[in-house]
Amino acid sequence: MSTLALRVVLAEDMVLLRDGMTRLLTAAGMQVVAQVDNPGALLAAVDSHRPDLAVVDVRMPPTHTDEGARAALRLHETHPALGVMVLSQVVEQTLAARLLADPPTRFGYLLKDRVLDVDEFVDGLRRVAGGATVFDAQIVDRLLGDAADARLDVLSIREREVLSLLAQSLSNAAIGRRLQVSERTVDAHLRSIFVKLDLHQSADENRRVRAALTWLGSAPPHA
């Protein structure tokens, strides 16, 4: 990723939204190198400009179903150094289920409502461009619904919030900033979560992964 301003290709077929997002990203210090309104133009723009990040609407012409999503997944495969953020008005369950089953790096999926929270949206873009995986908590919640692991019932509301953010690949410091609590408090919540979910002492990263998988409803059995 460039050490200078992030270079972005923006794919959105609604002119007003595309123009508004271009102004937003420019104000955040990013450089929008191309604006396109269809998947073919998106692929060509990425090949031509070699940006750091592509921001892609899930539904694009000609059918306004999943063209944008398919183009985003193709870009992720053909340009592994490219950060890809997909946006959608509603939860696209097929796409969400595919991504949650095997979370890719440098990839994000947010609902368009997140654009209204400029700081959160820009932070998500920067994290994806930096190599993280970012999922909208609402997408995870709506997709899983009642299928979430029953063990989560033992967690407090605050512990569930911490675990949800952990499952979005946030660090302890980032979780603290999001919840407006100290990193020490986040550490305490995580220790409690590990105990309640019966995640025994081992490498911290392993426990973090197991906890995140439990939240995502696919925790593997203990070895």
Image: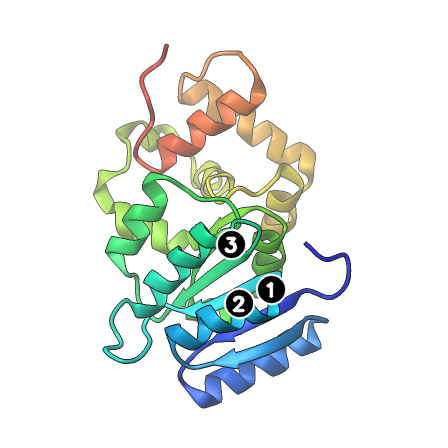
- Between the residue at mark 3 and the residue at mark 1, the CA separation in whole angstroms equals 9 Å
- Furthest residue toward right: 4
Amino acid carrying mark 3 in the image: His
Q: Taking 93 as reference, is 15 above or below it? A: below
Viewport quadrant of the C terminus: top left
Residue where numbered disc 1 is placed: 50
What is the crowding at mark 3: few (fewer than 14 residues within 10 Å), some, or many (at least 20)? Answer: some
Q: To which quarter of the image does residue 102 belong?
A: top left
- Between the residue at mark 2 and the residue at mark 1, the CA separation in whole angstroms equals 5 Å
Circle 2/circle 3 CB separation < 8 Å: yes
Question: What residue is rendered at 57% in x and 21% in y?
Answer: 204
Q: SS class of the residue under badge 1? A: loop
The one nearer the camera, 84 or 29, is 84
Residue where numbered disc 2 is placed: 46
Circle 3/circle 1 CB separation < 8 Å: no
What is the crowding at mark 1: few (fewer than 14 residues within 10 Å), some, or many (at least 20)? Answer: some
Q: Residue 144, position in %: x, y? A: 27, 45
Q: SS class of the residue under badge 2? A: helix
Amino acid carrying mark 2 in the image: Val
Visible residue check, residue 10 = yes
Residue where numbered disc 3 is placed: 79
